[in-house]
Image: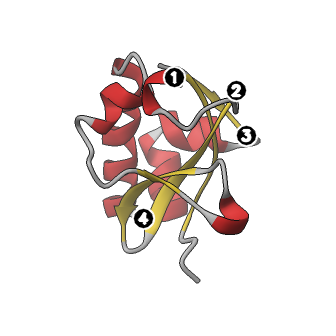
Amino acid sequence: MVLQYNDNMKEACHDIHVATRIYGKQIARKLHRKITLLIAAETLSNFMSFDNNAHWLTGNRNWEFSIPLSNGYSIILTPNHKESKAPQDHFIMTITTIEDYHD
C-alpha cells in the first residue's frame, strides 16, 4: 500500500523517538507496528486481514478509516479515491492524524 501523510504525520510515523515523545511509549510502539503492516499490505483489504478491529467511520467522519492503537487512540486515514468503501479498492491512503476521536 502507498501511504501519504498530512502535515507532520510522516515524522511521527517513521521515527519511534518522535512518536514516543508525542504519544508515549505504548502508542508509539503500536503505531510503528501498524505502519509496518500497512506498508507491507497491497491494499486496505490485505491490511484488514491482519487487523480485524480496523474500520470505516460514519456520520461526520464519513470517508475516514480508523486503525485502533491503544488508550482510545487510532490512526485515521482517508482514501485518495473516494469511489468505493470496498477495502480491496484502496491501495493509496493518507494518514491524516493520530487521535482519540471518541471524545
As displayed, is residue 77 above or below residue 59? above
Real-space CA distance between mark 3 and mark 2, rounded to the nearest whole angstrom: 16 Å
Badge 1 marks a residue whose secondary structure is helix
Instruction: Decide which of 24, 90 is in the foreground and name it.
Output: 90
For the point 24% across and 34% down, which residue is it?
49
For the point 30% across and 40% down, which residue is it?
33
Residue 6 — which label?
3
As displayed, is residue 88 above or below residue 70? above
Residue beneath disc 4: 24
- Which of label 4 and label 3 is nearer to you? 3
Mark 3 neighbour density, 10 Å: few (under 14) some (14–19) many (20 or more): few
Residue beneath disc 2: 81
Tag 1 and tag 2, C-beta contact below 8 Å: yes
Amino acid, disc 1: Asp
Query: Picture quarter containing residue 40?
Result: top left
Residue 20 — which label?
none
